[in-house]
Image: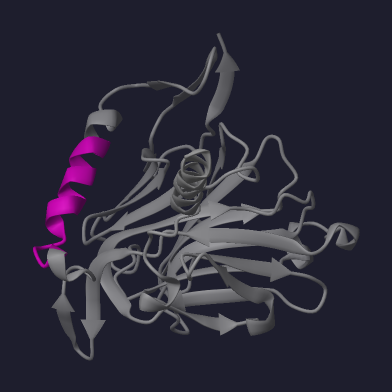
Amino acid sequence: MESFLLSGLLGFLMVNMLLASGIQGIRFYRYYNVTWGNSHFSSLYNDTEVQLTLDQSSGAGFESISYYQSGLFNMRIKIPEQKSPGVLTAFYLTSKESLHDEVDFEFIGSNGPPYTLSTNVYTKGVGGREQNFHLWFDPTTDFHSYKLVWNLYRVVFFVDKIPIRVFENLGAKGTYPTQAMKVAASIWNAQDWAGKIDWSNAPFTAHFQDFDIDGCALRGFYISNCASRPRKSRSLSDQATRMMLATLEVVTSTALPIRYGKNEWIKSQVQIDPVTPYQLTESSK
């Protein structure tokens, strides 16, 4: 009887460990492929988590199999624990054209606190729309969700379901991303401009989970469907609109107080372009 209970308890614990590790999630190769640095790529938990590693020989990257014309794109990321400037971990959309469109989440180094998350928007190869945010948590110790909503009207950047930036389509030609884009992630050596890497702390490993995509995939010259999952064959606008409405509710207020643990608070304002840059600030009560 005791051995039966013990085996049952061990089974229960094993199931919970697997769930916590994302074993029930979407497998990487369903929507993504490794594009460079294959020897610095590894997969875990039945391909529901992948790791990209940077050392002096190479980094690594992956991207979606399909191009998308709009969508809701999410990735759970844990950046390298080792401290160093110059190590760039990125999650982004890119059209891969010579005059490309791109929408970025970038961690430039992992030498916090404070930990800085950079966002940027490129149109026709032109960036210069960078906005930086100080995060209210340590992104090296656990996974956090980074989400992009992109459609004809606006781009919204989310961190753990909190909208931090809204980039509006103001209608001026060449100032908004309209090219079909792939979803991508990478870790690479940016020490030419982001600070010298302390290679004594190498290798640097970034972790990625949650490989589902909810977007309008491009098939040839046609947008074949507005969701990558069959059960979501309805228009992308359903979920994106709900996200937009939630965002607009936040935008109409001057501050968004949110509690994270005992006596820890953050107040943030959503960045609506074009306005003066600001940073998330953290305070204790």
Instruction: Give the side of residue 59 with respect to residue 126, left or right.
Output: right
Q: Is residue 243 magenta?
A: yes
Q: Taking the image as drawn, is residue 130 in sight? A: no
Q: Which residues are magenta?
A: 232-247
For the residue pair 73 and 30, the one nearer the viewer reads as 30
Residue placed farthest to the top in the image? Answer: 285
Count of marks overlaid on the render: 0
How is colour applied across the structure in the image?
A: one colour
Q: Position of residue 123 (x, y in %)?
A: 40, 68
Q: Position of residue 258 (x, y in %)?
A: 42, 22
When asked about the image quadrant of residue 95, the answer is bottom left
Residue placed farthest to the right in the image? Answer: 200
Residue ID at (23%, 45%): 243
For the residue pair 210 and 47, the one nearer the viewer reads as 47
Residue ID at (44%, 72%): 28
For the residue pair 215 and 24, the one nearer the viewer reads as 24
Is 129 located above or below residue 232 in the figure? above
Residue placed farthest to the left in the image? Answer: 234
Q: Main SS of the magenta segment?
A: helix
Q: Position of residue 66 (x, y in %)?
A: 33, 81
When asked about the image quadrant of residue 169, the answer is bottom left
- The C terminus appears in which quarter of the rendering? top right
Residue placed farthest to the bottom in the image? Answer: 220
Q: Taking the image as drawn, is residue 218 in sight? A: yes
Q: Position of residue 76 (x, y in %)?
A: 47, 53
For the residue pair 88 and 101, the one nearer the viewer reads as 88
Residue ID at (64%, 42%): 141
Is 233 located above or below residue 243 in the figure? below
Is 23 located above or below residue 247 in the figure? below
When asked about the image quadrant of residue 219, the answer is bottom left
Q: Is residue 117 magenta?
A: no
